[in-house]
Amino acid sequence: MRSLLRNQQPVFYKLYKGQEEILDEWNNPTGSFLPIYSELKSAMLCVSPNKGSSEVEQFGSLEDYDRTMTTADTTCDINEDAVLWVDGADTEGPYNYIVKLVAPWKNSISFAIKQVEVSEYEAEQKLFAEAKQYADHQAKTEHAVDQSGVEGTESVSEEG
């Protein structure tokens, strides 16, 4: 495989590191989890146009992907849990692709990638905001001073 520089484009990505459980305001687990990703990284990859028929695709009849990416850098650390910003997408905004399958070979690595909706990112960001709000509320309640029950007294003058 020839990895011509003129065919490559920058692809930004974050690697999946794990997940964190969301806690409610009483510090109880909610059963929902937030994904945790690494810092933003970039790589130069050859990204295909949209895919054609499955008879000529390198991933066979796997139909759950939209495009492919290839690189001659066999040390590329993009994995199947990575999120991607492809085609000049704003890295401050939502990611627009996810990796569905990685196919390493002797001299190259191919990736099957699928385009995702912005609403998935917004739902994830909403969970992040809720978790932060719960954490902030928990910190406030732990450090709050209870001043209930303290009342000032008033003196009443007697008129005679």
Image (tube, rainbow, N blue to C red):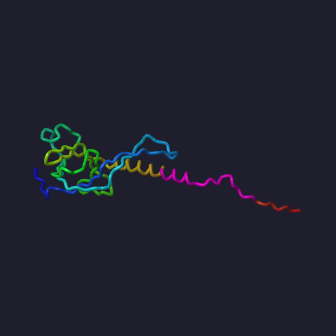
Read off the magenta span.
Answer: 135-153
90 with respect to 33 (left or right) = left
Nearest the viewer among 90 and 107 is 107
Provide residue 104's location: percent of width, then percent of height.
18, 44
Q: Is residue 143 magenta?
A: yes
Quadrant in the picture for residue 61: top left
**Where the C terminus falls, by quadrant?**
bottom right
User: Which residue is depicted at the point 42% across and 42% down?
Assistant: 32
Q: Is residue 73 magenta?
A: no
Nearest the viewer among 136 and 17 is 17
Provide residue 25's location: percent of width, then percent of height.
51, 47
User: Which residue is depicted at the point 22% across and 55% down?
Assistant: 43
134 with respect to 122 (left or right) = right
Q: Identify the residue at the far top of this view.
A: 61
User: Which residue is depicted at the point 52% across and 45% down?
Assistant: 26
Provide residue 105's location: percent of width, then percent of height.
15, 44
Q: Identify the residue at the far right of this view.
A: 160
Q: Is residue 56 above or below residue 143?
A: above
Q: Identify the residue at the far left of this view.
A: 2
Label count reads: 0
Provide residue 133's location: percent of width, then percent of height.
47, 51
Nearest the viewer among 107 and 153 is 107
